[in-house]
Image: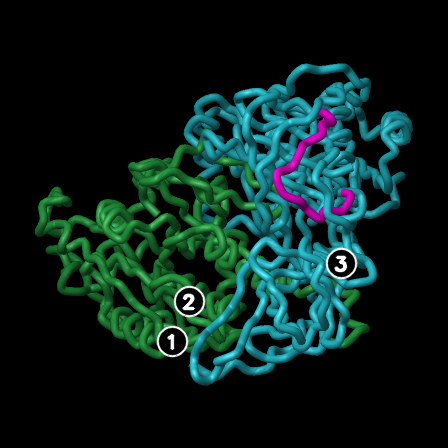
Amino acid sequence: MSASTAARALSHLDWLEAEAIHVLREVAGQCQSPALLFSGGKDSVCLLRLAEKAFRPGRFPFPLLHIDTGHNYPEVIAFRDRRAAELGERLLVRSVEASIAAGRVVLAHEGESRNKHQSVTLLDAVAELELDACIGGARRDEEKARAKERVFSFRDEFGQWDPKRQRPELWSLYNARIRRGEHIRAFPISNWTELDVWQYIARERLELPSIYFAHQREVVRRGAALVPVTPLTPPRPGDRVERRSVRFRTVGDITCTAPVESTARTVEEIVAETAATTVTERGATRLDDQTSDASMEQRKKEGYF
Amino acid sequence: MLAAERRPDPAPEDAGLLRFLTCGSVDDGKSTLIGRLLLDTRSILADALSAIERTSRRRGLERIDLSLLTDGLQAEREQGITIDVAYRYFSTGRRKYIIADAPGHEQYTRNMVTAASTADLAIILVDARKGLLTQTRRHATVAHLVGIPEVVVAINKMDLVGFSREVFDRLCAEYRDFAGRLGAGRTRFVPMSALDGDMVVERGERLPWYDGPTLLELLEEAPASGAAPAERLRFPVQWVCRPHTAEHHDYRGYMGRVESGRVRPGDEVVVLPSGSRTRVARVELHGQAIPEAVSGQSVTLLLADDVDVGRGDLIALAEDAPAPVRELAATVCWLGEAPLAPGRRYVIRHATREVPAVLGAIDHRLDVNTLDRHPAERLSMNDIGRITLRLARPLCPDRYADNRATGAFVVVDEATNDTVGAGMID
């Protein structure tokens, strides 16, 4: 950077990147045993790049941890494993399947979304690995309850978030002090929006699982959502199965993550589409957040990510 | 994954990022203003908009209640109030904005301080019918104390005073008088109707006598985050990178964020509090050498000599380094439920350093309505006062007026681990 540009402020992506790196280094500096939650999704892909920028040429001062619902797209799991190997970092996987087998999770019915049950597996992993911090890619623009959550979010020994007892967060002075059994959820990209994420992916040329890009897929229309036809989500009697060009805006448990119609095949096309979209990320794609106005808040209070 | 490449220069139209907060008395229209900003910059997506349309209809309202966009928590919806700071985002294409939506109720002053601590600009809302209220003055005072560089006073609800120029002029004069007594800096004024949108994003046609900028134009022109940093280099060390690999056997990088100033290879620096002197050998961003790092950038410094540096140390230019102190005199906003009182053990977090501290004295408590100073034995939640703290180990701070990053600290209660105080060093 030349002296003449130094007086100018950082571009908005540079600013967001510098803030996220600062947060990651504060987690590493203040916590004894953190883990970075990596699912293979776009937000956690950004987190990995930020961690490289924060700690290279050193190794990451934390392992990667995936809470696997067992309901993932195979492309995403393959991508997850390959990225961890390419980075030479340790990937730990804890599965909801194992929690079910151990009787820690009881499903209401076999096809139930496992999304909310991740909390049990995550908290078990926190206890087993003696984690004092979990770094995640949640963003405040995703949902109203998230908009209120701190960058360093204190969780009690039950993993609960109490919106009324949050620690004030001033300047960039984060407080990760906890007692044994408690932990911190740290969100380095709190201040990013969906568009920022895509712009960053474009700028950094980050690779993503293929299902983020437009592809032909069999879907069923249910209300406003397109439900993918998969072994876990077969068509119901009377459903009309269509083949459409779709992409995923958000990737998670198959049973509750829906694609959107799109022909965007490149990151640049997705950036343009995201800038012009009229539907929120969760509104378009999540089948489980709409049960009530407060479903996310409720789940977070119970320890959800 | 492609290898790290040289990043493209920021687009010429990228005016960086601006963090601002909205404040003012209850019912001055903060939530409506935020809703209006989001709506008129087309930042509210169709499904979110139709959800609040439904709710507005259900409540028997004739038009969309924009304030429904901002009150997110169950207790807030139940009680119809805002109980915590929320952060919202919008972009104009030219610039990205982070709004800290701070509650207006007096008992949540600590949340206002929280929101203000990171803001580059404050919008202080005034109800044109009611004029300056206690809470307006209180928020103006806090915004000034916390050192927000730019203040915009939005005279709202102009539709309810017949878009009267006289009312606007009178309220501006009244605010200027108060700001003068505060010693506050630059203040801009804009008349508006957040409900209808006049002078927020669109000019509207009902304020023809006002030829100044709209609120959004003021926001677009304001200096971006970190655009006018303090000149002196302050680099708190967050993390020491020692890879111990064959390739990087002797590598020792000091990682952190440039909180102010700039740093280049060859600079003579001092490591505080030890006082060791050396030179910067290399400045890196993601493993690549860069000619200079500026305020706001998270980078890695490599030093010419093998001096002892750890997390919590501060790197500064040798010629203008801050002096170590064992006592702090500061203005503190108390955030904790238990009052600040003698005898309790606290930890001070200043930049990346933590030191134990005890209360020396409470010099006075400030009445933020009258700016009068009163003697005090303790500071309760939401109180602002001037105190001295005795430190178990030295810190190397700046005055808050000179540097918002290294002039600030938080107080952590050792017993509860809660963040209980926000301090600004005199």
Q: Main secondary structure of the magenta part?
A: strand
Q: Closer to the N terminus: mark 1 or mark 2?
A: 2
In the image, is residue B274 above or below residue A14? Answer: above
Q: Nearer the viewer, mark 3 or mark 1?
A: 1
Give the amino acid type for the residue marked by disc 1 in the picture.
Leu
Q: Nearer the viewer, mark 1 or mark 2?
A: 2
Circle 1 SS class: helix
Which residue is rendered at x = 23% and y = 63% of the image? Answer: A72
Q: Write down the region rendered in magenta.
A: B385-399
The residue indicated by pointer 1 is A87
Q: CA distance from mark 3 to mark 2?
A: 31 Å
User: How many marks on residues?
Assistant: 3
Give the amino acid type for the residue marked by disc 2 in the picture.
Phe
Q: In the figure, the cyan chain has which letter?
A: B
The residue indicated by pointer 3 is B227
Which residue is rendered at x = 52% and y = 28% of the image? Answer: B83
Q: Are marks 1 and 2 in contact (CB under 8 Å)?
A: yes
Q: Is residue B76 left or right of residue B398?
A: left
Q: Is residue B284 left or right of residue B48?
A: right
Q: Nearer the viewer, mark 3 or mark 2?
A: 2
Give the amino acid type for the residue marked by disc 3 in the picture.
Ala
Q: In the figure, the green chain has which letter?
A: A
